[in-house]
Image (cartoon, coloured by chain):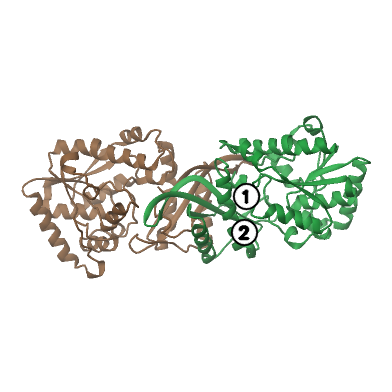
Chain colours: A brown, B green
Amino acid sequence: MEVTEIRAGELDAEEFIRKQVRNISKIVGKGSAINALSGGVDSSVVTLLGNKALGKRLTTYFIDSGLMRQGEPQAVVSLFQALGVPVILIDAQKEFFNALKAITDPEKKREAITQTFYRKVFGRLVLKSKAGFLLQGTNLTDIEETVAGIKRQHNVFEQLGINPQKAFGYRIIEPIIQLRKDGVRKIAKALGLPRHICHRIPFPGPALAARVIGEVTPRRIHIVRKATAITEEELKKSGAFQYMAILHRDRVTGVRSGKREYGLQVEIRCWDSIDARAATPTKLSHETLMGLAEKITMEIPEVVSVTYNITTKPPSTMEAI
Amino acid sequence: MEVTEIRAGELDAEEFIRKQVRNISKIVGKGSAINALSGGVDSSVVTLLGNKALGKRLTTYFIDSGLMRQGEPQAVVSLFQALGVPVILIDAQKEFFNALKAITDPEKKREAITQTFYRKVFGRLVLKSKAGFLLQGTNLTDIEETVAGIKRQHNVFEQLGINPQKAFGYRIIEPIIQLRKDGVRKIAKALGLPRHICHRIPFPGPALAARVIGEVTPRRIHIVRKATAITEEELKKSGAFQYMAILHRDRVTGVRSGKREYGLQVEIRCWDSIDARAATPTKLSHETLMGLAEKITMEIPEVVSVTYNITTKPPSTMEAI
């Protein structure tokens, strides 16, 4: 399947929305669909397009994997309830942490999350709902990077030559596959999504598990969740495309109460980018960086060291794993 | 043994040199001494003090552990030859790499280096030379941090309650134990050491092994050596107290020739400090940092990511391991 890009500058938002709503209606027919909402701009747009097309025949789930950011599951569900879109919150924390136990290889971690998400948790929901269609927020950058082997996305089965109907029992609909992030934001705005969702910084599918190098445990997620909350609070005024805190596995020497201690290191990344294809570290002030490191090491005693990534993409990628 | 600090501001360099030369002469008597020169300001000062006191009765070795910086062994030996101080270069690279094989724990790495240095390589030289005395460049900060458990120095046996005469067969003389780095630099200048030695940035005893997290192999030392050469070249005009490149064990995602690749990450640290007791990351320009990352990732293809440390000491330490 060849995908034709629609550039943000040439995008007529109203027409795009009408076309996609019509398209979803046509494909689903008298059937029903389900989708998983993560609270990111991609899945939020798809949820609203699906809701416009299908109304109550779309069931939207928010799966709490235990890997989400601070307060995120409740905040996302509340927001969509307020927009008139019911969202069902599924607590699957134990299932995810069990699946992630003792895994350190990044590929295997993503695979464990994909399997737990699609085959187990979401798979059960699909079977129960008897929905024949799955709406997904795959965008053009995801596709290109998956094909190029740069990124391993869980939501691009067709591109990888996997038949989702055979493998998972449903057909996938990807309404925003022709857009990049800037285009998706334009649609989000036109759909009336609040500013903090339209301009929410990108957040990966495997959530905080993508921000932990090495084994993903409840304790390590707790630490990176705190570092993420501090980083997002301190950098929200930076105007950057994306910013994140990454917990390393390598331990480094630190001093706590005058004694040497092998502690944890957190890496901060903050990117300037238009569409995630290329990116440059944001020029943050020395004071901002120092303040961020001070706050993180003060509020998370296990962390004795904080770094700021200074590499462009390429040769770096946005995320660390 | 209580050590009384001599502050740099109150230090009379000429008097200090006379006193230490007299003291070394008195202790060694008609015997002979040996010392190991690393090329740092501490061991360089001690070599010249020893040379003034003992002349040919001091034998100075430069042990090439394979862990030194680019061109360092030859450069140090040539410099001291030019100053009229003969230095014997010992190639012990294989012995060190063999001792370090498969060790990842930082304590065990330092222990392996200490054992290889003192018990094996230097121990053999001491026995062969029949010298009864060893001159060492321990300074006051080393002592304090060893006692406090922050640092593990190989040259502070007495402080750790180890009798070097029993353990290694020689008595240790530490002429600069009352000084901190700023005091040592003042003495170096008064001794006529060239500016690039007096103001050489501090470099740890375990050399580049202290800059590699995880296993120390010839390949990993080769990579961190290249990163160190670039970092020192780019930051030499920064006026910073110390700067370094650290090779991490954690791998991160990068892009090389359009394909995803798990690559290496190098961390840069650049410290403003008076005496290494406390330190602040140097305020380097965004352009300097970006240029450094670009150069490292261009010249070392295995490295796809570079970070800059933004933590103060404490809670960080100067070195990572």
Q: Are marks 2 and 1 in contact (CB under 8 Å)?
A: no
Q: Chain of mark 1?
A: B
Q: Earlier in the sequence, mark 2 or mark 1?
A: 2
Q: Amino acid at mark 2?
A: Glu
Q: Marks 2 and 1, how far apart in space?
A: 16 Å
Q: Residue at x 57, y 63 (%)?
A: B284
Callout 2 and callout 1 share a chain: yes
Measuring from the top left, give residue B203's x and y in whole percent.
Answer: 67, 51
Q: Chain of mark 2?
A: B
Task: Look at the picture and state if A233 lies above or below B236.
Answer: above
Horizontal side of A95 relative to A88 (left or right) equals right
Residue A267 is at least partly visible in this image = yes
Checking the image for residue B318, the label placed there is 1
Label 2 vs label 1, nearer the camera: 2
For disc 2, the neighbor class at 10 Å (few under 14, some 14 to 19, many from 20) is: some
Residue bearing mark 2: B232
Measuring from the top left, give residue A228's x and y in whole percent.
Answer: 42, 49
Furthest toward the top, the residue is B166
Q: Quadrant of residue A148?
A: bottom left
Q: Amino acid at mark 1?
A: Met
